[in-house]
Image (spheres, helix red, strand yellow):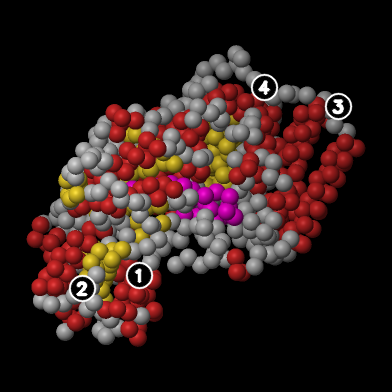
Amino acid sequence: MGVGGTHEAKTTYREAMREALRQALRSDDRVFLMGEDVGRYGGCFGVSLGLLEEFGPERVRDTPLSESAFVGAGIGAALSGMRPIVEIMTVNFSLLALDQILNNAATLLHMSGGQLPVPLVIRMTTGAGRQLAAQHSHSLEGWYAHIPGIRVLAPATLEDARHMLAPALADPDPVLIFEHGSLYNVSGELLPSTAPVDLDHAAIRRPGTDISLITYGGSLPKALAAADELAAEGISAEVIDLRTLRPLDDAAITVSVARTHRAVVVDEAWRTGSLAAEVSARIAEESFYDLDAPVERVCSAEVPMPYARRLEEAALPQVADIVAAAHRAVD
Amino acid sequence: MSLAHPTRTRKDSAPPKAGKRTTTTRGNGRAGVPSGRGDTGHRTDLLESMLRIRRFEERCVELYSAAKIRGFVHLYIGEEAVAVGINEALTPEDAVVSTYREHGHALARGITAEAAMAEMYGRTTGCSGGRGGSMHLFDASRRFYGGNAIVAGGLPLAAGLALADHMRGQPHVTCCFFGDGAFAEGEFHETANLAALWKLPVLLVCENNLYAMGTALERHEAQTDLAMRAASYGMVAWAVDGMDVEAVEQAARRAVEGVRTGTGPHFLELRTYRFRAHSMYDPDRYRHKAEIERWKERDPISLLTDRMRENGELGDDALARIEQGITDEIDHAVEAAEQAPEEPVEHLFHHVTSSSAEAVH
C-alpha cells in the first residue's frame, strides 16, 4: 500500500507515516525504530505493521514498557552516531520519559558547550476523540513546545505525515513528532513526488481575507470545515497550519493577521498556558495595531478528558465553536 | 558463595577491614581473569592519578570559599580509588557516563586539570565551554558523556551508547557510574532490565558511599544488598572494596572482560565513602564524626602509599616529586582559568540547537 505507484491510490495518514518510516529504514543503516509494540504487534496504532518482517528485530525493536529507559537509550544511541526513531504510545505516557527528553535530549548540546548534539526523533500520538478517557487523550505538545533545544512537529496532512520524517531525521537536534490519533484513518490521494517538508515554516491550507484561523494537527480538519461554513456565509477565512510548534513561524502569523485583521486560534489543549496562549500573546505583541477585534481562542474545556461520548465531544473544540468564535471576531 | 556481599558487613557502616577483600561473586571468576599490572611503575601511576583528583578537589574547596567557583560542587574526596581503578580497565574507545560527582571520573578519564578547572570557572576554555560547571563535565573526544545531575538519569543513556556499539558490532564497553541513591529511582531498574534483556555491553558501577545525599542507605533502601538486587536482573554482580585501588582495578578488569565477551551487563558495587559532605552547601549533620574518622583510616591514598612503602616501592623523595608535579599542574590550571576569556553575552544562545548562533524563538 505504498504511495509510489503509477496510479493514484487512496492512502491513509497511517500508511503515509509507515511509508516514511520504511523509506527512512531503507535509506540509512543508522536508522532504527524502537518502542512499545512497534515490532510483532505492528505498532499500537498499526503504523509500523510489516516493518519487522522487512527490516528484522534489530532495527524494528520492541521495548519493555519503560519509557524513560528506551527514550534515554535512544538519546545514548543518537549520541553515538545512530539515528533512532523512538515511538511512545501516547503523549500521556511520554511524561514517564520527560526527564530524559528535557534534562538530557534538550540540554546535552548546551551543557556540553556544543559537543553533544542529539539527532533523535521521538514520535507519539496525541489528542482526544476516541473515548479513551483521561490517561490516553490529552494534548500536551504545547508543554514540549515550551522547551528550548528541541523541535516540535505536528503533521496534520497526508503530505506532512509522509514527508516530515526525512527532514526530522536530518535535523542534528531532537525532534518530537505529534500524530493526532484521529488522523490515522484520514485518507486521500498522495502525490508520489511531494518534496520534503520545510520544517521552519507554517502552511496556508486555505487562503482567505477576512479572518485567520490558526491551528495545527488534529484541529486542522475542523478549522477547514469551519472555513467552509464561513465561506457559505460570505466570510473568507484563511487557515494557517502551524505544522512546527517550536520554533513557531512568527512571520506566517503576522503576515496573515496583517491581511485579515482578525484571528481565531484553535488548539485542542487546555486554554490555560496553552500553545494558543502563546500564539495569542505573540499576535498581541507583534500585530496589535493590525487587529480589528480581540483574538479569539477555541480550546478544550478545562477538565480531564471524560470517557462519556457526549461529554468528550462537549470538552473538545468543535466546528461550531470555531464558527461561533469567528463570528464574534467578525460581527 | 553467595550471589552478592552479605548485608551484615555493612550494618554498622563500618569500613571494610584492611587486607580483607569483601569481593564475592556468582561463580569462580578466577580462571583466566586479567589482573592489574601490579608493578611499581603501575602502582605509582595509580597513586599519581588518585593524588591529582584529591589535590584538584582540595583546591576547589579553597576556590569555592574564595567565591571563585560557584554552583553545586560535589566532592569525590575519599572515593578516588573507584574512578582510578575502574578507568584502568577501560580503553579510549570505551564510553563513560557519569554523575554530578564526576571530577574524579573526568580526571581519571584524561580530561586535564586545566580543562576541568576552567569549567569550574565557567570559562570558554572549560571542557564544556563554561556551560556546564562542576556537575556537567563533558568531553566527546574521550567519549566522556557527563556530568548528569539527575540521579540515575545517565543510566538510560549508557544503555543507548552500548546499544549503538552493540548494533554496529563494535567491541566497546560503556561504563556507567552512579551512586547508591540511584537504586531508589525507576531509571536504574528500567535500565538494568533493558540492558540485561538485550545483553548490552554495559558495566554498571555503583559507588555505594552509604548516603543518598544526607539519607543513609538503610534509611532509603528496603533491601540494602545492592549487588544481590542487580543480580536479580540476570547480570553478573559483585561487591568490591572501593577503598583499595588495586582491588578495584582487578575487579574492573574482570568485569570489563566479561562484558566484552558479549554476556551482557555486569554490575560492580564499590563500597566506598565520601569524607566530605554531599555538596559544598551541605552542613553534614547526619553523620557521626567517629564514622567519618573510621573510614579515613582506610583512605585509599594512604592505603596504597603504605603498601608501596612497605614494599619499598615509594620513598619520601619520590612522593614529594609526585606531589610537586601535581601542585604545579593545578597551579597552572588555576592560573590559566583565571586568565581564560569569559564568553561574551552575545553568545548566550549558542548551542541551544546545532544551528543556533542567535536567539531562537
* Part of the protein shown in magenta: A104-124
The residue type indicated by label 2 comes to Ala
Residue indicated by mark 1 = A252
Residue B346 within the magenta-colored segment of the rendering: no
Q: Position of residue A300 (x, y in %)?
A: 21, 66
Secondary structure, mark 3, is loop
Dot in front, 3 or 1? 1
Q: Say if mark 3 contacts mark 1, CB within 8 Å.
A: no
Whether residue B265 is visible here, answered yes or no, is no
Task: Tell me if mark 1 has few (under 14), some (14-19) or many (20+) residues whose alpha carbon lies within 10 angstroms of its own.
Answer: some
Dot in front, 2 or 3? 2
| Quarter of the picture holding the C terminus of chain B | bottom left
Residue indicated by mark 3 = B312
Q: Say if mark 1 contacts mark 2, CB within 8 Å.
A: no
Residue indicated by mark 2 = A237
How far, Cα to Cα, is label 2 from label 4?
Answer: 76 Å
Residue at image location 63% in from the left, 41% down from the top: B142
The residue type indicated by label 1 comes to Ala
- For mark 4, name the chain: B
The residue type indicated by label 4 comes to Ser
- For mark 3, name the chain: B
Same subunit, tags 2 and 4: no
- For mark 2, name the chain: A
